[in-house]
Amino acid sequence: MQFIHDLGGGFSLGLRTMDTAEEMHQLTLRNLDRLQAWEPWAHEAQTLSGSVDFTRAQLADFVAGTVLPAVIICGDSLIGAVSLRLNSYLKTAELGYWVDAGFEGSGAVSRACRALLEHADSVGVKRVEIRTAAENRKSAAVAERLGFALEGVLRSALPVGKARLDVALYAHVQSDP
């Protein structure tokens, strides 16, 4: 049985499960060129067995309570991924996301992130961070729309292919408005 959370606007959020591994693999392959501009993992060989292994690891972390791995759904199709990595000791979390090129600007990512932020609040998280390549304006725009504040730039912190990119560090602290 798949857990589904209605996000409104025709979008929903589901738990990433073994049933989603093949479709997420195909979605990744369709978006690989644009993901390679920002994501170190996109430069690795993209195989179905690798997607299955990644999903299995995410589910193990979910069971351990350290990750909430989710897929973004429109109708019957997976259109992206969003996850919340939790540190219960520090009461912090890191939010990550990506979406199919055809759904950029649709509000799907912001809706999915808001749902995970509500979950973070419900489990007592006090600080949530978003780290994105400093030049990735679309990702930064999501952070800003969600009310995250830019705290600084980590120089040359992200190895992507043969380059090292600066990372913009955004954060939302529970006491922030």
Image: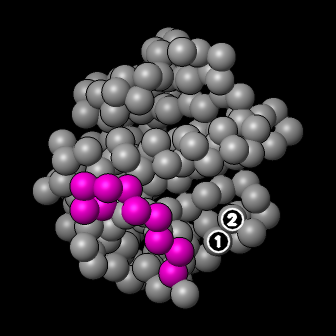
The image shows a total of numbered marks equal to 2
Q: Which residues are magenta?
A: 2-11
Reply above or below: 113 against 78. above
Quadrant of res 117: top right
User: Does the image show residue 99?
Assistant: no
Q: Name, please, the residue furthest toward the right.
A: 89
Q: Is residue 159 magenta?
A: no
Identify the residue under disc 1: 59
Task: Decide whether residue 10 is among the magenta residues.
Answer: yes
- Residue 176 located left or right of residue 74: right
Element type at mark 2: helix
Mark 1: few, some, or many residues within 10 Å (few <14, many ≥20)? many
Q: Residue at x 55, y 87 (%)?
A: 1
Which secondary structure lies at badge 1?
helix
The one of 74 and 48 positioned closer to us in this rendering: 74
Label 2: few (<14), some (14–19) or many (≥20) C-alpha neighbours in 10 Å: some
Q: Nearer the viewer, residue 167 or 162?
A: 167
User: From what the image shows, is residue 156 above or below residue 18?
Assistant: above
Mark 2: amino acid: Phe
Using the numbered discs, state the Cα–Cα distance from disc 2 to disc 1 in whole angstroms.
5 Å
Q: How is the image coloured?
A: one colour
Image coordinates for residue 63, horizontal then vertical, percent: 75, 69
Tag of residue 62: 2
Q: Amino acid at mark 1?
A: Leu
SS majority, magenta: strand
Quarter of the image with the C terminus is top right
Instruction: Indicate the position of residue 11 as horizontal and vertical percent values.
Output: 30, 61
Residue found 38% across the figure and 83% down from its top: 22
